[in-house]
Amino acid sequence: MRRVAALAALLPLAFSQDPKKDPDQIGVRDVSKGINFYSIQREMALGKALAADVEKSHKLLTDKGVSEYINRIGQNLATHSDTKIPVIVKVIEGDEPNAITLPGGYIFIQTGLIKIADTEAQLAAAMAHEIAHVAARHGTRQASHSQVGQAATIPLIFLPGLGGLCGLGANRLLVPAAGLADSRANEKEADMLGLQYLYKSGYDPLGMVEIFERIFSLDDRKHGKATRAFSTHPDGDQRLVEVQKNIEAQLKDRSQYVVNTSDFDKMQVHLAALEWDKKPEPVAPKAPTLHKPGDKFISAKKFVPESGAAASQMKEAYTIR
Ligand SMILES: [Zn+2]
């Protein structure tokens, strides 16, 4: 009787401690458990082929300073993660705060994502989310799951990886309805695991809250809140709440965190200078278009004041739509 009581006392502890929720078990637990028809070798070969496609359809940023910095952050996070697959991080040009993560460890960070980050901890948070997709092998697991349900063609669901964070537009169209629930669950898990990797690498975990706030507020201004209901990603507000909950429940307090570095600031200045260099020469202002009698009236142009705080706000609102 006494033995039964002692066992019963042990049981809740043993079962309540999900290793995925315990950052102390990073590296010694298996976060990629589940049905998967792909061996790691096959996954890496598939990723390599898909990465070649991405490199054909996107412009790689070849600048050494930026790409080496981004790769260094990625490798450091990977070292503090569960991934058994080596991570390859490259930068692609594009204004969206987005990234593409392919099976086999291929991560493409878009310059728009780098630029929206205000600190190294914020940028690392977004990258940690991507590395979590690699570690948990979400791409091939989701593909295997879809094959079981005979629901989906395979390569489409891998693109793009990061989300509202991982890319609203294309993702929403490509992921078949059956994969939506999977995708949302994967995003939620990538948020949780990524947060742990961020923390384990010494960064301020609040960096994840901050980068989500920045990305989601841009998303809302751009697409409107309603579109997110159809995205593969859980609602932004809900994600923020979850991250905050996970910080409290899973991460022990530390006396010091890395929030930012001078390398991050230097890289941002360098990236801005690169983009400035590429801007075309200013052209002479166009002569006004005049309407002649008989011209068809197309649409009235909205009035945008030229100067003042209101003017810059309005201009910004117009340009990002
Ligand atoms: Zn994601």
Image (cartoon, grey):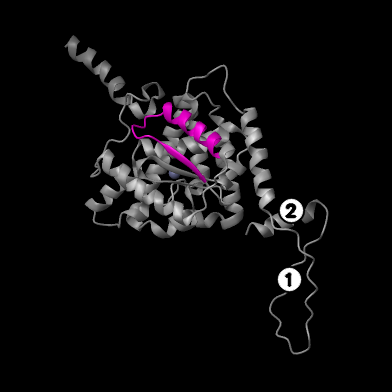
The residue depicted at 52 percent of the width and 57 percent of the height is 226
For badge 1, the amino acid type reads: Lys
- Residue 134 lies, in percent from the top left, at 38, 38
Location of the C terminus by quadrant is bottom right
Q: Nearer the viewer, residue 223 or 48?
A: 48
- Residue 11 lies, in percent from the top left, at 26, 20
Q: Which residue is mark 1?
A: 301
Q: Is residue 288 left or right of residue 111?
A: right
Q: Which residues are magenta?
A: 67-91
Disc 2 secondary structure class:
helix
Using a 10 Å C-alpha cutoff, classify the residue at mark 2 as few (fewer than 14 neighbours), some (14 to 19) or many (20 or more): few
Q: Is residue 230 visible?
A: no
- Residue 276 lies, in percent from the top left, at 69, 49
Q: Is residue 201 above or below residue 91?
A: above
Most extreme residue toward the right, as rendered? Answer: 307
The residue depicted at 27 percent of the width and 57 percent of the height is 151
Disc 1 secondary structure class:
loop
- Residue 110 lies, in percent from the top left, at 53, 47
Q: Quadrant of residue 138?
A: top left
Using a 10 Å C-alpha cutoff, classify the residue at mark 1 as few (fewer than 14 neighbours), some (14 to 19) or many (20 or more): few
**Ligand 1 occupies quarter:** top left
Q: Are marks 2 and 1 in contact (CB under 8 Å)?
A: no
**Disc 2 from disc 1: Cα separation:** 17 Å
The residue depicted at 47 percent of the width and 48 percent of the height is 166
If you read the primary sequence from the N terminus, does the residue marked by circle 2 or circle 1 appear first?
1
Q: Which residue is mark 2?
A: 313
Most extreme residue toward the bottom, as rendered? Answer: 294
Q: Is residue 56 visible?
A: yes
Q: Is residue 81 magenta?
A: yes
For badge 2, the amino acid type reads: Gln
Q: Is residue 320 left or right of residue 156?
A: right
